[in-house]
Each structure stands twice: as structure tokens, then as C-alpha cells.
Amino acid sequence: MKDKITIESKVHGFGLATRSRYNRGDVIHRAINATRFDAFHDRAAFIAGTMNHSCKPNVKLLLNDDVVSIVALDVIEPGEEIVCDYDQTEGTDGEARTCLCKTSTCKGTFHIRK
């Protein structure tokens, strides 16, 4: 996690960025011994807590047995904000919030667990 930094976000408040370049398919971070996405949030609070939502994410979270990985969906340049789709990790049955991502694919809302 040495190359992860917090930056002023174009989406909301502060966000997560990296000092390194990642290509599509690269693993940005991996949490081992995580059995659910909740465990990922607990084990990697810095990463999960600073990653903002976007309807056009540049990473996805993959759960495989007890390993959760953050994987690049596109090339991520140094200093570029790392964003995920909260609906992918939180589901769509939580509390709806207004989306601030302003992307061309914006759904208008995202969901978080209460």
C-alpha cells in the first residue's frame, strides 16, 4: 500500500489515488483471509474508506474464497483517482444516495448499507 495516496477528489471530498501506473487487469491491492466484502472493509479500511463511488469505475472488487482483490478495469495513471461502483460491493438494497460522479453513464444514485 506504499504507493496509495489520498488526494482532493473531483467526485467528493478526498479520494484514493496511486503513485504507480496500473494496466487493465492489474491487481492494485489484495486482502487475504477476507470471507466477505465486510471483512475487506475491516482489513483494508484505508483503501475502502477513501475510495469514492463512480458509475464509471476504473476498478472492480473480486471475491475469491477468502481473498478480495481490487483489479484495474482500465489503465490508471499515477495521480488518477481510483473509483469503484458502490452498487457492486454494497448491493442495491441499501439506502439510496445522490451520485456526484457526473460521468456520461451516471445512474443518478448509488446505494450504501445502513
Image (tube, rainbow, N blue to C red):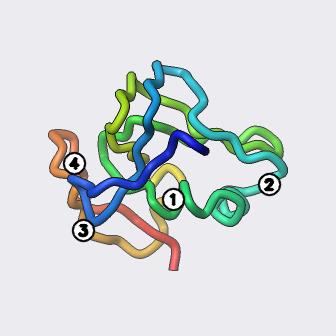
In space, the residues marked 2 and 4 are separated at their CA atoms by 30 Å
Give the residue type at disc 1. Gly
Q: Classify 76 as above or below 108.
A: above
Residue that numbered label 4 is attached to: 106
Residue 35's label in the rendered image is 2
Give the residue type at disc 3. Thr
Residue that numbered label 1 is attached to: 91
Residue that numbered label 3 is attached to: 98
Upstream in sequence: badge 2 or badge 1: 2
In space, the residues marked 3 and 1 are separated at their CA atoms by 15 Å
Q: Residue 46 is drawn in which quadrant?
A: bottom right
- Where disc 2 sits, the SS reads loop
- Where disc 4 sits, the SS reads loop
Say left or right for 24 vs 9.
Answer: right
Q: Position of residue 13 (x, y in %)?
A: 28, 66
Which residue is at 41% across, 65% downward?
Answer: 111
Please state which of residues 82 and 97 is positioned toward the viewer in this rendering: 82
In space, the residues marked 2 and 3 are separated at their CA atoms by 29 Å
Upstream in sequence: badge 1 or badge 4: 1
In space, the residues marked 1 and 4 are separated at their CA atoms by 17 Å
